[in-house]
Image: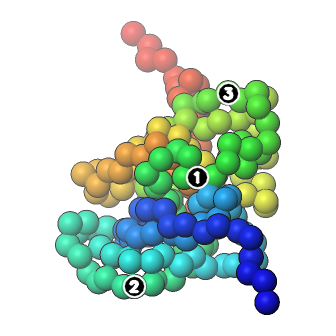
Amino acid sequence: MDTSPRTYRFLPADIYTSGYRVVGKVMISTNGIMGVLNDITKSHLELHDARMARIHMPSKLVDHFEVIRLVKSQIFAICAARREDLGPSGMQRGGYSNVSALPVRITTQVYEIEGKLEVAGRFDFAAIIADKARNFIPIYEAVLTAILMPSLKAESPGVLINREKVDILGLIGQRAKDEK
């Protein structure tokens, strides 16, 4: 029986759920972390050499597993070590080459994320949130902060945000000017 021609490799990932931070390695193919997360045939993610910590005590290790499985729908965000780890640029941007980077602030029930959202053409919130082909959207040069624990910050060149967990998305360029 022939083996698959795909090459798999491990990439480090920092995953945030509502109550835990899990750090480990994701096995990916040429489509990067986005390919694994946006694969509609699997509702879970396997993380190898995974270490768990509670959000409110991020420096205290709770447990360590050879392999841990996470339900994708319960993941809020995944931080990658490099922007390239998210996947090919065509997959990240939806295949478009003319892209605008918009500074944004995104909130979920647990986290705030500030960074740059890359869009092709005009910004369309409904299209981003309703895109069933991509459950996880990339945010670049991102800072993730826990709302109730602002000392918990994670900076990453690339973060994937679960679009189903997004409560608010504000464009930094549309902030109200202070009246004096």
Callout 2: helix, strand or loop? strand
- Per the model, the C-alpha gap separating discs 1 and 3 is 18 Å
State how many labels appear.
3
Q: Is residue 167 left or right of residue 5?
A: left
Q: Is residue 28 left or right of residue 82?
A: right
- Per the model, the C-alpha gap separating discs 1 and 2 is 23 Å
What residue did someone put label 2 on?
66
Q: Amino acid at mark 3?
A: Ser
What residue did someone put label 1 on?
86
Q: Along the line of sight, which residue is nearer the eye, 140 or 162?
A: 140
State which quadrant residue 32 falls in.
bottom right
Q: Position of residue 97 (x, y in %)?
A: 76, 31
Query: Around disc 1, counting alpha carbons within 10 Å, would you say few (fewer than 14), some (14 to 19), or many (20 or more)?
Result: many
The vertical placement of 160 against 71, above or below, is above
Of pointers 1 and 2, the one earlier in the residue sequence = 2
Of badges 1 and 3, the one in the foreground is 1
Q: Are marks 1 and 3 in contact (CB under 8 Å)?
A: no
Q: Are marks 3 and 2 in contact (CB under 8 Å)?
A: no
Q: Amino acid at mark 2?
A: Glu
Q: Position of residue 73 (x, y in %)?
A: 61, 72
Of pointers 3 and 2, the one earlier in the residue sequence = 2
- Residue positioned 56% across, 46% down in the render: 84
The quadrant of the rendering that contains the N terminus is bottom right
